Amino acid sequence: MSVTPSISQVDSPATEKLAIPPLLGASVSELTAWVQQQGQPAYRGKQLHDWIYHQQVRSLADISVFPKQWRTEIADIPIGRSTIHYRKVAPDGTVKYLLQLADGQIIETVGIPADKRLTVCVSTQVGCPMACDFCATGKGGYKRNLARHEIVDQVLTVQADFQERVSNVVFMGMGEPLLNTDNVLAALTSLNQDVGIGQRMLTVSTVGIRDRIRQFAQHHLQVTLAVSLHAPNQALREQLIPSARPYPLEDLLAECREYVALTGRRVTFEYILLAGVNDLPEHALELAQHLRGFQSHVNLIPYNPIQEVDYQRPSRDRIQAFVNILQQQKIAVSVRYSRGLEADAACGQLRMNKK
């Protein structure tokens, strides 16, 4: 049985901070300190770093530059890699992965190829406690946070499977990233400094947790913040996102404005369009009133169907009408048709099974 945790319970790290092992997610300096603790010269830390992040070794026994005897001694120390439990390819080339973690838990990751770009959609929790009504992940409940190495591993897994360098990472998979802040920040650092992905190529998505956007801003990262809004008023937002009840929309938007002031980075507002629910002209006008003069961008996402609810995707004419109203109100807006729809790998469709 899944139990919805309190924020303090959710945000407790899955492993000790800077825990080694698992080694994945550790920096050059951390790995150097570790090899020295093992009685090895400091330069082996850089070797270990290269083999973990660039040669993507899965066992320390396979690092051929290490002395054979030491390799034997450390062979059972985990690097922190998952195994591919299931893999499904959509007609558009998007690949959905079910990854099995060391404790047997299953998470979803999505690889999204495009011209000269490979994006990975990573999960940050096993399940999700936010219970958004239109999202498959929330229907399965919450189990635990992902540790730093379990987040970074998703990117390396997709990179190895595609045999192509990952260019972009979006924290839009299973879970609420800002309920796992410590591990998400550690993973962002590793993806940037160890894997070599620029901060501006990293996007963190959140439904909005009181004070967490403000705290996130204080790290002054150059990543993109995407806030899942999905409604232009509090009453409708509570209907779609029950966890939004204690956090009024006006307070959330005020915190987003603080984020812009602190970081100089605009906020992306994600808005899933549900036919007849939040896609009417009056909804577009109400949304525009909130965002006028805001350094932001609205990303409209036509609904991707799941079995548990009977929401519908709006027609293209209805979608375009919503876009036109926002543009007339001088609101920056674009429409994102999710990739991987046929493989149940699109936005809102991720779940811990093979459907």
Image (tube, rainbow, N blue to C red):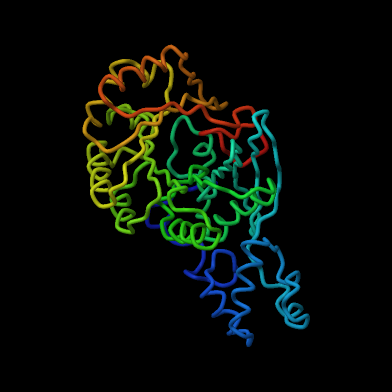
From the viewer's perspective, is residue 148 above or below residue 121?
below
Taking depth in this image into account, of 63 and 242 the one nearest to the observer is 63
Residue at the outermost bottom position = 39
Q: Position of residue 227 (x, y in %)?
A: 37, 40
Q: Is residue 212 left or right of residue 25?
A: left
Residue visible at 57% across and 41% down? Answer: 117
Q: Position of residue 232 (x, y in %)?
A: 29, 27
Residue at the outermost front position = 116
From the viewer's perspective, is residue 89 above or below residue 51?
above
Q: Position of residue 53 (x, y in %)?
A: 61, 62
From the viewer's perspective, is residue 66 above or below residue 314?
below
Q: Position of residue 276 (x, y in %)?
A: 40, 15
Residue visible at 71% across and 47% down? Answer: 85
Q: Is residue 284 left or right of residue 37?
A: left
Taking depth in this image into account, of 197 and 149 the one nearest to the observer is 197
Image quadrant assignment for residue 150: bottom right
Residue visible at 44% across and 26% down? Answer: 335
Image quadrant assignment for residue 116: top right
Q: How many numbered marks have been drawn onto this rendered protein structure?
A: 0
Q: Is residue 75 left or right of residue 281?
A: right
Q: Quadrant of the C terminus?
A: top right
